[in-house]
Image (cartoon, rainbow, N blue to C red):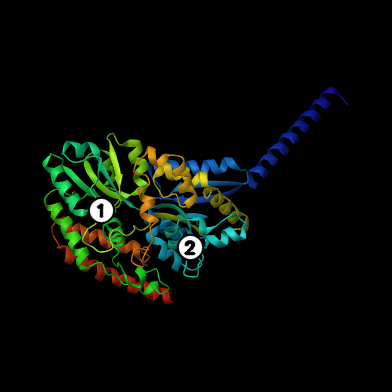
Amino acid sequence: MSVVHQRGVFTQFKQLALAASLLATGLAAQAQTEIQWWHSMTAVNNEWVNDLARDFNASQKDYKVVPTFKGSYDESMTAAIAAFRSGNAPHILQVFEVGTATMMASKGATVPVAKVMKDAGADFNPAGYIPAVAAYYTAPDGQMLSFPFNSSTTIFYYNKDAFKKAGLNADKAPATWPEVFEAAKKLKASGHSCPMTLAWNGWTQLESFSAWHNVEFATERNGLSANGYKARMKINSPLHVRHIDNLAQAAKAGEYVYKGRNSAAQASFTAGECAMIQTSSGYYGDVAKNAKFNYGLAPMPYYPDVKGAPQNTVIGGASLWVMSGKKAPEYKGVAKFFEFLSQTKVQAASHQRTGYLPITMAAFELTDKSGFYQKNPGTDVAVNQMIRKVTDNSRGIRLGNYVQIRTIEDEELEQVWSGKKTAKEALDAIVSRGNELLARFEKSYKK
């Protein structure tokens, strides 16, 4: 064999070896199962979600979780439904709590998380979760349907620097609604252009307000009974009317300033424009990172003359639903990811970073032992509001078509804030329009 021929054979051998290597690399890459996760987290919470996926992916080699922002909660739900119908749904979908009843009624679209975990032989103990959280995402037959993720509750934030300027006690938040309205007057008198604002109006001022005062929001145990699909709204009671009317009077006086729907108002508090806000405990991460003033966290205010108040607040935030139509290895990957998220250290770190609930009592206890609550006063408020004994009126809200009902609540309350409707007119309209949608849901549920 000539030298030239030998070199040719050697070159061919190198090419074959390189091709084999590339093929092996390709097969290895293919062996890693991708898990698509659609979510609605923005800003600092979007960073948190990406970090969770990165940490899980780095912890093992078999699965790769790919988080994708798909817009607001209602936008991501709409996108997922369309994707499911076309056979392209993600493996995991983050759904806010008001979409729970709709997801439960979407027969065939999801797989109960309890089944996913059991089939994969994953470590999963619903009894370890904070009872109010686990109960909300559990079916009447006791099976947990979705994985609790960024569970939150309503809390009260206030600007301590603004309080000092107004001659208020910066170390003591207003505990009652009369105290809140009095503080708003003093803040206004001190020159503050936005004494108080509110985020998620329907959630904070109707749902959480009802549970905190132990009053009925809707029939059928607020939709949580076995016949929850028959529920009808009852938020035009004298107490509800009184509260919304009080807010209307504050709005007229410039002591409450409406800043928009959903979480829009939060930016005005972070910027120091508004001195008080009621919103999600999950807003804490944004405040801690971006607020340039001293701030305080406190429980929701209540009316002291209402018997049984304060009771407990209801769950907010979202859970993770597993979509159907996937292969067994993919579901095993989902289970492994949920198993990772369930780890006490991961839960505790997420709670401390974001302000969302720690989900499990073990994570709460670990956070407490670490001294985090002592170093960051008020960060335990959300948990303490949720771990109280619940009643049928305070267990939570689970109503069909509630995404659309939330929009109705916003529309009608906006009429109140602008002075175009009285509190009673608006609440009567919410009940009437909301019950039409609930009746429609009942009919579709029975089909």
Residue 85 circle label:
2
| Front-most of residues 56 and 247 | 247
* Left or right of residue 245, residue 327 in this image: right
Q: Looking at the picture, how far across and down is residue 33, in whole percent?
A: 60, 49
Disc 2 residue type (three-letter): Arg
Q: How crowded is mark 2: few (under 14 residues within 10 Å), some or many (20 or more)?
A: few
Choose the circle earlier in sequence order: 1 or 2: 2
Residue closest to the far top: 3
Q: In this view, does 4 lie above or below 214?
A: above
> In the displayed structure, does residue 121 sit left or right of residue 139?
right
In the rendered image, is residue 378 in sight?
A: yes
x 28%, y 39%: residue: 295
Vertical side of 434 occupied by 59: above or below: above
Q: Percent x, y for residue 213?
A: 28, 61
Residue indicated by mark 1: 301
- Residue under the point 63% across and 57% down: 121
Q: Give coordinates of residue 200: x percent, y percent.
A: 29, 54
Specify the amino acid type for callout 1: Pro
Residue 390 vertical position relative to residue 227 in the rendered view, above or below = above
